[in-house]
Amino acid sequence: MVVAAMCFFIALQACQQRNTNSTATHTEISGACVADTIIYPVLIKNADPYDTWTEQCLSRLERDKLVNQLFNAVYKHKAKAYNYTTNEELSIADIKEIEEQDDFSRDKVAKVQFWESWHFDEEQLIMTKKVQAILLAYEYLSEEGELRGYKAAFYIKLN
């Protein structure tokens, strides 16, 4: 029991360490591909003020910065946005149209969905995840302002 508690504490501390290096480092992918493409959602905004666990999990996320950087990448032609259902490329005018919808605001972007490839190097015990694409989804609210679900805005393919 004590060992489990110590392992949990060490893992928690490791997750809380900040990267002091201001530039990103690119890790070479090594090992066997264990997931050619895996798709999963991640909540990036806590809709429940009483959910302290989710609040703690998101405490180090700069959600506004992430959302703005993704929109800016599209507006600056550094990334292309795509329609989630048709996979058709969206124009800048299409993105502006999404932003002008009554039910949309960047502040409502509360979930992302990742498309990733996963590699596992069993010799070095290294897991490498490469993000292929990221989808932005925003809160879909009832007339009373209650969360009913999430609506896909668009997705971006990454290099």
Image (spheres, helix red, strand yellow):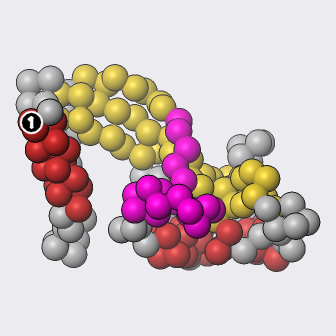
Residue at (53% x, 36% y) in the render: 39
On the image, the x and y values in percent for residue 3 come to 9, 36
Question: In this figure, which residue is indicated by the disc labeled 1?
Answer: 3
**Residue 93 makes an appearance in the image:** no
Residue at (40% x, 26% y) in the render: 35
Say above or below: 129 vs 51: above
Residue at (42% x, 27% y) in the render: 36
Left or right: 88 in relation to 133: right
The number of numbered discs placed on residues in the rendered structure image is 1
Q: Does the magenta stretch include residue 51?
A: yes
Relative depth, front residue between 2 and 83? 2
Relative depth, front residue between 77 and 63? 63
Magenta-colored span = 39-57
Q: Does the magenta stretch include residue 25?
A: no
Which residue is at the far right?
Answer: 143
On the image, the x and y values in percent for residue 93 come to 78, 72
On the image, the x and y values in percent for residue 60 come to 36, 68
Left or right: 90 in relation to 75: right
On the image, the x and y values in percent for residue 20 come to 16, 73
Label 1 amino acid?
Val
Which residue is at the far front?
Answer: 1
Quadrant for residue 146, please give it.
bottom right
Relative depth, front residue between 49 and 83? 49
Quadrant where the N terminus sits is top left
Q: Is mark 1 on a helix, strand or loop?
A: helix
Residue at (47% x, 76% y) in the render: 65
Relative depth, front residue between 28 and 1? 1
**Residue 96 makes an appearance in the image:** yes
Q: Within 10 angstroms of label 1, few (less than 14), some, or many (20 or more) residues? A: few
Say above or below: 141 vs 113: below
Quadrant for residue 154, please give it.
bottom right
